[in-house]
């Protein structure tokens, strides 16, 4: 890695990770499972206050298992947030389901309950309700869960919370990932805490978690020989990586605090620029501020690419907002429901930039990012 580069969000070890890994080595519990995996599950449960957890090799595998537990199969509808990373909906296609995308609301960039209502009206009129709704908590901010849940409860359709980006973020005092029937977290390298790669499935329903554990461990029946009745997967997290996760959990609250400071510094740095607004934060929750994202005003002559290129010239990483699923070649043939005439997710994509939000970034480095963005807006020569 280039030490001078300022990153969007890179791994930030707390120091205790090595202790847990060392213990795994000392006891030769390198594999298959072991104490770190069990404790990592317990510690996450303690933190988010839920009942059942399953440590997995990725957030994507956690979403896949949640869909398996809900018996998603060929031709089933699954509703999903439109403005997200493709991993939110790829598992729907693994099971030959049919994704239907739901637009964002302007005020949080998360799933619009009004667009969700429209999709449900369509499904009801066609006598085919979705088997699940995948709600993403984008960039570390909770979606409007009361309004979304109210509609899903009315139709008795379970929610899978894709909390890959939002570990530690709350909705009205409850941890994201613990509100729906299932929740998933990701510990990929760029997330707020990381195991280098990993994920977790969460539910109050311990029986389902046990079923997922069985499926994730090659679906081996409890027999003295290898007996298989169901199709299984090799999705468990290794005991070494779970050790990294245990160390990372100890610094999660620090990371959230730091991410919030970064967000607030950008907010302050851009407050006089009418051309730029931060991702809006709704008052119902407390985000983990995983990524600080901006939107460039409509009538400004500047594109996201101008800012991204400028920062990149200075060895600073910035990125476009997730390109909405309904605009992806892989997904554009599927239905997409929006609140009104304009797709809000599309607007956000056209005007949005994710700015460096690395917790190792210094104040001076962030000030540099702010002044570079300002210069692009004012088209000053550096
Ligand atoms: C990162 C991410 C995932 C996938 O998690 P992995 O651990 O990388 O498989 C899923 N959904 C969203 C919204 C993500 O940001």
Image (cartoon, rainbow, N blue to C red):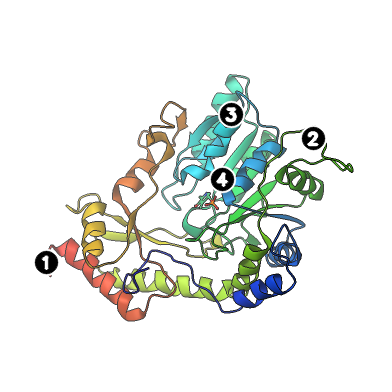
Q: Is residue 351 left or right of residue 254?
A: left
Q: Residue at x 67, y 42 (%)?
A: 65
Question: Which of the two labelled residues, at mark 3 and mark 2, occupies the earlier sequence position?
Answer: 3
Question: Which of the two labelled residues, at mark 1 and mark 3, occupies the earlier sequence position?
Answer: 3
Is the residue marked by circle 3 packed among few (<14), some (14-19), or many (20+) residues within 10 Å?
many
Question: Which of the two labelled residues, at mark 4 and mark 1, occupies the earlier sequence position?
Answer: 4
Cα separation, mark 1 vs mark 3, equals 50 Å
Cα separation, mark 3 vs mark 2, equals 25 Å
Question: Which secondary structure lies at badge 4?
Answer: strand
The dot on residue 228 is 2
The dot on residue 97 is 3
| Residue picked out by circle 1 | 380
Question: Which secondary structure lies at badge 2?
Answer: loop
Q: Nearer the viewer, mark 1 or mark 2?
A: 2
Is the residue marked 1 within 8 Å of ligand 1, measured from its CB? no
217 or 164: which is nearer to us?
217
The answer to whether residue 320 is above or below residue 240 is: above
Q: Work out whether residue 180 can be spotted.
A: no
Q: Nearer the viewer, mark 1 or mark 3?
A: 3
Q: Are marks 4 and 1 in contact (CB under 8 Å)?
A: no
Q: Is residue 226 left or right of residue 373?
A: right
The answer to whether residue 382 is above or below residue 68 is: below
Question: Which of the two labelled residues, at mark 3 and mark 4, occupies the earlier sequence position?
Answer: 3
Cα separation, mark 1 vs mark 2, equals 66 Å
Q: Number of labelled discs? A: 4
Cα separation, mark 4 vs mark 2, equals 33 Å
The dot on residue 135 is 4
Cα separation, mark 4 vs mark 1, equals 41 Å
């Amino acid at each position: 890695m280039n030490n001078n580069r300022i990153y969007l969000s890179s791994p930030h070890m707390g120091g205790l990770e090595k202790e847990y890994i060392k213990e795994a080595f000392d006891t030769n519990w390198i594999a298959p499972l072991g104490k770190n995996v069990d404790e990592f599950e317990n510690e996450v449960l303690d933190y988010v206050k839920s009942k059942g957890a399953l440590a997995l090799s990725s957030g994507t595998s956690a979403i896949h298992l949640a869909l398996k537990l809900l018996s998603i199969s060929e031709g089933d509808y699954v509703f999903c947030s439109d403005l997200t990373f493709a991993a939110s909906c790829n598992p729907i296609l693994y099971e030959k389901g049919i994704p239907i995308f739901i637009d964002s609301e302007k005020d949080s960039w998360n799933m619009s309950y009004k667009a969700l209502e429209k999709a449900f009206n369509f499904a009801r009129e066609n006598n085919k309700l979705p088997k699940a709704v995948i709600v993403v908590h984008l960039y570390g901010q909770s979606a409007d869960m009361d309004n979304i849940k109210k509609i899903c409860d009315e139709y008795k359709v379970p929610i899978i919370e894709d909390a890959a980006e939002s570990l530690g973020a709350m909705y009205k005092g409850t941890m994201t990932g613990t509100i729906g029937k299932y929740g998933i977290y990701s510990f990929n390298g760029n997330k707020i805490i990381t195991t280098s790669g990993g994920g977790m499935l969460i539910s109050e329903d311990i029986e389902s978690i046990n079923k997922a554990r069985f499926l994730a461990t090659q679906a081996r029946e409890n027999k003295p020989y290898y007996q298989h009745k169901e199709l299984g997967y090799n999705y468990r997290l290794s005991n070494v990586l779970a050790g990294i996760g245990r160390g990372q959990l100890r610094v999660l609250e620090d990371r959230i605090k730091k991410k919030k400071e970064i967000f607030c510094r950008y907010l302050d740095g851009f407050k006089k620029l009418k051309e730029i607004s931060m991702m809006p934060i709704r008052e119902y929750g407390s985000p983990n501020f995983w990524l600080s994202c901006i939107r460039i005003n409509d009538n400004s002559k500047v594109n996201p690419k101008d800012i991204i290129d400028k920062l990149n010239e200075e060895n600073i990483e910035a990125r476009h907002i997730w390109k909405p699923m309904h605009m992806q070649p892989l997904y554009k043939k599927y239905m997409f429901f929006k609140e009104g005439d304009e797709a809000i997710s599309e607007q956000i994509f056209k005007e949005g930039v994710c700015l460096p939000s690395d917790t190792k970034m210094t104040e001076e480095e962030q000030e540099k990012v702010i002044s570079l963005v300002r210069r692009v807006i004012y088209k000053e020569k550096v």
